[in-house]
Image (cartoon, grey):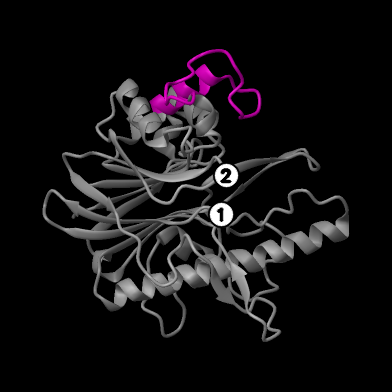
């Protein structure tokens, strides 16, 4: 069974309020990309993935005026995907939902939030070590799913979109520094909260997959060493914790080349930056049943690089690339 995570930039812009595809020449939201171009590119990418389940980050928004589930199922039908059933959890107001698109012949999936507090509520933590706990809230609450495969395997799945650390809205260098540090604190707090949920599942012996965009990777900003541990390291688990495993995350500590799952244009430096933001982490109970983790990078992956149509589609579809793992479940 192939499980994927994929952050699709401005996916919501490709649908109207009734969940229908806007397959036209309007601008998509991606720089210099028309809607029909992004839709075509996404169709190529999703068909190439041929995944049994895709955790979509920045999925079409869902609220009383827009139906993100219908939008995704419309897209799947249009593209002829096996993974044609969609499920969302707690909706948010950012136009960037978290949703699972899955093959109903291969699994069932149910939104099943756990914990106290739940991810749609406030979490208290002392971010500033001043003995005064602050309230932290997910702008995009993780999607907690109870999944049962057609082989009868029960799996817990948590889709994640952790807070960005970019200093959006800063009007000066000092303000950019303040916002970047504050965002990093909040991102780490979210990851501490998430790790607590991970521990709950591991204590119960659950098969667990944690996947999505952690907005955390090497070289993202100059403050990453200020707090000692990254959010990814916290969720994976440190000394004394039962670890989760992702080989791409493990590569961060080996030295040498680091894989990349996202690509951004740095306007001030006039260059591209690539970094690792997207992960598929599995519990110890699944490590021996997992193989072939793959970042669908259009250049670094040699097999993809041999298919020009797929290379162009991956560059056009989003600023992130899919990450997949094969699981015997």
Residue at image coords 24%, 74%:
205
Residue 51 image position (x, y, % from top left):
29, 39
Q: Earlier in the sequence, mark 2 or mark 1?
A: 2
Label 2, label 1: how far apart the Cα atoms are: 7 Å
Query: Where is 167 relative to 207, above or below?
Result: above
Q: Nearer the viewer, residue 5 or 61?
A: 61
Q: Quadrant of residue 180?
A: bottom right
Number of numbered discs visible in the structure rendering: 2
Give the structural element (helix, strand or loop) at label 2.
Answer: loop
Query: Where is 294 relative to 235, above or below?
Result: above
Residue at image coords 75%, 60%:
179
Is residue 222 at least partly visible in the picture?
A: no
Give the structural element (helix, strand or loop) at label 1.
Answer: loop
The residue sitting at the left extreme is 151
Q: Nearer the viewer, residue 56 or 286?
A: 56
Residue at which label 2 appears: 94
Query: Where is 137 relative to 304, above or below?
Result: below
Residue at which label 1 appears: 139
Q: Nearer the viewer, residue 130 or 261?
A: 130
From the image, give the main secondary structure of the stretch colored magenta: loop
Which span is picked out in magenta?
Answer: 16-44
Determine if the magenta segment contains residue 290. no
CB atoms at circles 2 and 1 under 8 Å apart? Answer: yes
């Amino acid at each position: 069974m192939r499980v994927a995570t994929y952050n699709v930039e401005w996916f919501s812009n490709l649908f109207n309020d009734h969940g229908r595809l806007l397959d036209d020449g309007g601008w998509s939201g991606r720089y210099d990309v028309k809607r029909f171009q992004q839709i075509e590119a996404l169709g190529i990418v999703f068909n190439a993935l041929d995944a049994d389940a895709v955790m979509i980050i920045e999925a079409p928004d869902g609220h009383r005026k827009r139906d993100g589930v219908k939008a995704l199922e419309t897209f799947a039908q249009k593209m002829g995907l096996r993974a044609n059933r969609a499920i969302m959890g707690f909706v948010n107001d950012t136009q960037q939902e978290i949703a699972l698109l899955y093959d109903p012949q291969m699994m069932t999936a149910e939104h099943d939030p756990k914990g106290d507090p739940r991810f749609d509520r406030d979490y208290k933590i002392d971010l500033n070590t001043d003995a005064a706990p602050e309230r932290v809230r997910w702008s995009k609450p993780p999607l907690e799913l109870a999944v049962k495969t057609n082989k009868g395997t029960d799996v817990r799945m948590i889709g994640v979109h952790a807070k960005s650390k970019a200093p959006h809205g800063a009007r000066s260098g000092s303000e950019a520094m303040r916002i970047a540090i504050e965002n990093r604190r909040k991102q780490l707090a979210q990851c501490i909260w998430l790790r607590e949920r991970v521990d709950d599942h591991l204590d119960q012996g659950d098969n667990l997959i944690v996947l999505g965009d952690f907005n955390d990777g090497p070289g993202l900003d100059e403050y990453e060493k200020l707090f000692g541990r990254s959010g990814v390291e916290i969720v994976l688990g440190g000394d004394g914790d039962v670890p989760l495993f992702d080989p791409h995350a493990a590569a961060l500590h080996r030295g040498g080349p680091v894989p990349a799952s996202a690509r951004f244009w740095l306007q001030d430096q006039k260059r591209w930056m690539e970094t690792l933001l997207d992960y598929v982490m599995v519990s110890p109970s699944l490590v021996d049943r997992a193989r072939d983790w793959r970042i669908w990078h259009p250049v670094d992956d040699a097999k993809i690089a041999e298919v020009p149509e797929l290379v162009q589609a991956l560059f056009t579809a989003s600023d992130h690339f899919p990450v997949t793992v094969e699981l015997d479940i």
